[in-house]
Structures are given as structure tokens and as C-alpha cells.
Amino acid sequence: QVQLVESGGGLVQAGGSLRLSCAASGEIFSINAMGWYRQAPGKQRELVAAITSGGSTNYADSVKGRFTISRDNAKNTVYLQMNSLKPEDTAVYLCNADWERVGVRLHSWGQGTQVTVSS
């Protein structure tokens, strides 16, 4: 199993910054990629940013140029630096790990952290 624990959410004014952290434990050697998703009330969960084990990244168009995903392999932690936050960024942010065991692709989710951006 891969376990994920997020931290770093909170309340911030528009234009401000927050950094989210996601610490992975367990079968971390099996992780292919990690990502951040978000879900706002009444909306579908959407991918915000992802990073592969090789270091490739991708971002949702709505956050390009404002958010940066990175990782610290020594700490088994992935970060999401969020700058120039907008009220529409308000959501629960969830960390995801894409991993596999004996050829079966699996996903693990963190518990989520609330990000609220006031106007």
C-alpha cells in the first residue's frame, strides 16, 4: 500500500500564496507518478498538476504559470507551490499516487486539504 498525508492548506487572500505538501509512505518504490487534484463544491474532481518518477510535469491550463509541482525524493514528499491565488482556486486539494503491484495499476489518495481564497 501507499499512504499519503497532505498538509499546508488554509485561508489566503486573492493574490497570495500557499504551499501544499504530500508525504508518501509504504510501497513508495512502486510509485510511477504523483499528482494534485482538486474538487470544489458541485464540481467534478480535476487534475491540477502531476509529476512522474522521471521528473516530467504537467499542469491544468487554469494554473499554468501560477502553480509549480516539485518533489523531494529524500523525503518522499511532493509539493504544490501556489502563487497568485484566485477565488476560483478554492477547493479541497487531494494528493494522488499512481503506483503498481505485480503489474496491476493502483491509486492511493490522501485525505484532502482545504484551500480557501477570499476576494
Image (tube, rainbow, N blue to C red):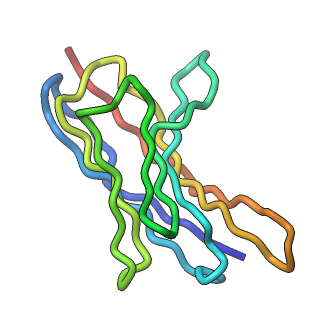
Residue shown at the point (29%, 47%) measured from the top left: 68
Q: Quadrant of the N terminus?
A: bottom right
Where, by quadrant of the figure, is residue 25 drawn? bottom right
Where, by quadrant of the figure, is residue 16 drawn? top left
Q: Position of residue 91 (x, y in %)?
A: 45, 30
Residue shown at the point (58%, 55%) measured from the top left: 96
Q: Is residue 102 above or below residue 83?
A: below
Picture mark count: 0
Residue shown at the point (17%, 22%) measured from the top left: 14
Who is closer to the viewer here, 20 or 65?
65
Q: Is residue 43 above or below residue 3?
A: above
Q: Is residue 20 above or below residue 72?
A: above
Who is closer to the viewer here, 64 or 40?
64
Q: Is residue 51 left or right of residue 33?
A: left
Q: Is residue 46 left or right of residue 114?
A: right
Q: Quadrant of the C terminus?
A: top left
Q: Position of residue 111 (x, y in %)?
A: 57, 54
Who is closer to the viewer here, 52 or 84?
52
Q: Position of residue 85 (x, y in %)?
A: 23, 28
Residue shown at the point (65%, 82%) measured from the top left: 27
Where, by quadrant of the figure, is residue 6 drawn? bottom left
